Amino acid sequence: MQRNPLVLFASMMVCISLVLTLKRSTRARAETDPAALAPCPPPATLPLKVDKVIRRSRPAFTEGLVYWEGTLYESTGLYGQSALQRLDPATGISEKLVDLPNDQFGEGLALWQGELLQLTWKQGIVWHWPILADGIGLAAVTTPYPREGWGIAAGMDPKKGVGLIASDGTSHIYTLNPKTFTAIDILTVRDDHGLIAGLNELEVVEGNAQSSIWANVWPTYRVVRIDPVSGCVTGNLDLSPLRDFLAPEEQDALARDPDAFPNGIAYDAANSALYFTAKNWPIFFRMTLAR
């Protein structure tokens, strides 16, 4: 008996549709149900080895931090105080480059294809600051951003596993379409105890073969190192000992500040170094990674 080609084609399309629906259903369940995800081994405890403490010329409400060609660039938050500024890692001198409008709350910052991308918290806007031969161009443009802005980061070599990524304060890290900022993939971050909520500032640290993602967990002193393929936390870094570098009166003042937790990670690839800071802290830190 000869089969109708149209019937065969329709049957094939139904099968494809069912497979795609099953995949979407499985992925959606994995994003919301930790039991649907592969278990993660216990993460390592990462050593905290500070090799430089830099006192800032003025504290800031740090939301994003980027290292580029010997300079730290910083996105600061709070309504009426948000800005883009730069920090000299050698001297700690900070210089405000531009203020954001008073109705915008600055968030994460990333270097991506010749621009600094600066998020806003609830305004649905990302600022594009062009990188020029003599510094940062202040004639920025804005484009829509489809979710709350928290952290954003980018790998310089996507072949090592990480492109443009973002967080939204949940346990998810989104791989973004760099033109529309819509999510093209979602990584669910967890350790051997379950999901890790509160992912905030992000940084990509590129290894010899594969990158890792580092994230501040808000509001805590914990930094997690994340496998970009599995979403498993492979290392925990406790930044609470950094409080010992503060003067007693600074410790007392920050203890009364509910926002004074670590937020801000920047990677200096040439020197295998990470910079850390915290909201409203008068100092920031450099830590060299083992090669």
Image (cartoon, rainbow, N blue to C red):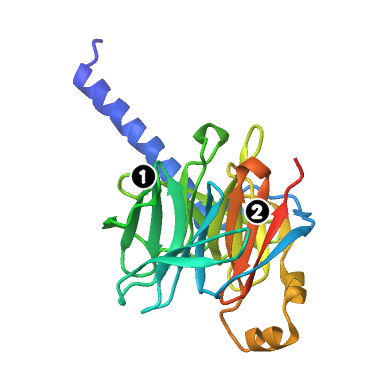
Q: Residue at x 46, y 61 (%)?
A: 108
Say what amino acid the circle numbered 2 marks.
Leu
Is residue 250 left or right of 27 when viewed as pictured?
A: right
Q: Are marks 1 and 2 in contact (CB under 8 Å)?
A: no
Percent x, y of residue 13: 29, 29
Instruction: Give the left or right position of residue 68, taking residue 232 as reference.
Output: left
- Decide which of 201, 39 is in the foreground and name it: 201
Question: Quarter of the image holding residue 253?
Answer: bottom right
Above-or-below relation of 249 to 86: below
In-front residue for pair 3/92: 92
Eye-nearest disc, 1 or 2? 2
Instruction: Point out the image quarter for the N terminus.
Output: top left
| Residue position for label 2 | 274
First along the sequence among labels 1 and 2? 1
Label 2 CA crowd tier, 10 Å (few <14, some 14–19, many 20+): some
The x, y position of residue 85, in whole percent, is: 45, 64
Residue 185 seen in the current view? no
Nearest to the observer: residue 88 or residue 277: 88
Residue at the location (56% across, 52% down)? Answer: 203
Residue that appears at 63% across and 62% down: 276
Give the number of callouts.
2
- Which residue is the site of mark 1? 178
- Please say if 273 is above or below 60: above
At mark 1, the secondary structure is: loop
Crowd tier of the residue under label 1, counting other residues whose Cα lies within 10 Å: few below 14, some 14–19, many 20 or above: some
Residue 263: give x, y in percent of width and height: 58, 67
Q: CA distance from mark 1 to mark 2?
A: 25 Å
- Quadrant housing the C terminus: top right
Q: Is residue 205 visible?
A: yes
Residue type at mark 1?
Pro
